[in-house]
Image (cartoon, rainbow, N blue to C red):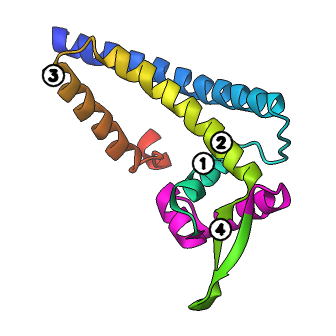
């Protein structure tokens, strides 16, 4: 086996390990976020990471319609409808209509939703600072190679899942 072949297999092994760690990180992030909401006396029935990202999207673009949220988060409009219904029930967002367009519904944050938005932003700022600090250990060419690899994996992911016929 060529040394580059061995390196590729090692990269694949590390990639799988990273995938598992990322999954664990999302669970931990949600646990920390839930603990923070309790600390600030905020109650939620919808505690999925996607719900929090819907709040984040609304907070960054309000007032915003469901089509824009769906496109921003790459989710279906049906998913946004389901999530927004829960967030409305939780008192995190409110609906409104524009004076010039009485048909379309727009969402904005309530004070409770604004608190969640700000908590989430602080968490991400902290994660981003740590990430950027770690990236300081890489040279410019290493950063470029890392970016190229991550983009390739994103592009490849769009082609998944595997077809059953590929496994036969």
Give the Cα distance between marks 4 and 2: 19 Å
Mark 2 or mark 3, earlier in chain: 2
Q: Quadrant of the N terminus?
A: top left
Mark 4 or mark 2, earlier in chain: 2
**Residue that numbered label 4 is attached to:** 107
Give the Cα distance between marks 2 and 3: 33 Å
Mark 4 or mark 1, earlier in chain: 1
**Residue that numbered label 2 is attached to:** 49
The disc label shown at residue 140, or none: 3
Which residue is located at x 36 percent, y 14 percent? 134
Q: Which is the main secondary structure of the residues drawn in magenta?
A: helix
Front residue of this view, candidates 24 and 36: 36
Placement of 114 over or under 64, stated as above or below: above
Mark 3 or mark 1, earlier in chain: 1
Q: Is residue 53 left or right of residue 154?
A: right
Q: SS for tag 4?
A: strand
């Amino acid at each position: 086996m060529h040394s580059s072949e061995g390196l590729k297999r090692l990269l694949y092994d590390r990639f799988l390990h990273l995938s598992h760690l990322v999954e664990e990180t999302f669970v931990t992030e949600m646990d920390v976020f839930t603990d923070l909401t309790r600390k600030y006396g905020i109650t939620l029935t919808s505690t999925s990471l996607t719900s929090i990202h819907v709040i984040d999207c609304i907070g960054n673009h309000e007032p915003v319609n469901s089509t824009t949220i769906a496109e921003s988060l790459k989710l279906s409009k049906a998913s946004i409808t389901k999530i927004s219904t829960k967030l409305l029930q939780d008192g995190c967002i409110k609906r409104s209509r524009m004076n010039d367009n009485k048909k379309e519904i727009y969402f904005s944050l309530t004070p409770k939703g604004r608190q969640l938005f700000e908590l989430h932003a602080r968490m991400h700022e902290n994660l981003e600072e740590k990430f950027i600090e770690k990236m300081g250990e890489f040279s410019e060419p290493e950063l470029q190679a890392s970016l190229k690899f991550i983009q390739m994996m994103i592009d490849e992911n769009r082609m998944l899942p595997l077809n059953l016929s590929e496994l036969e």
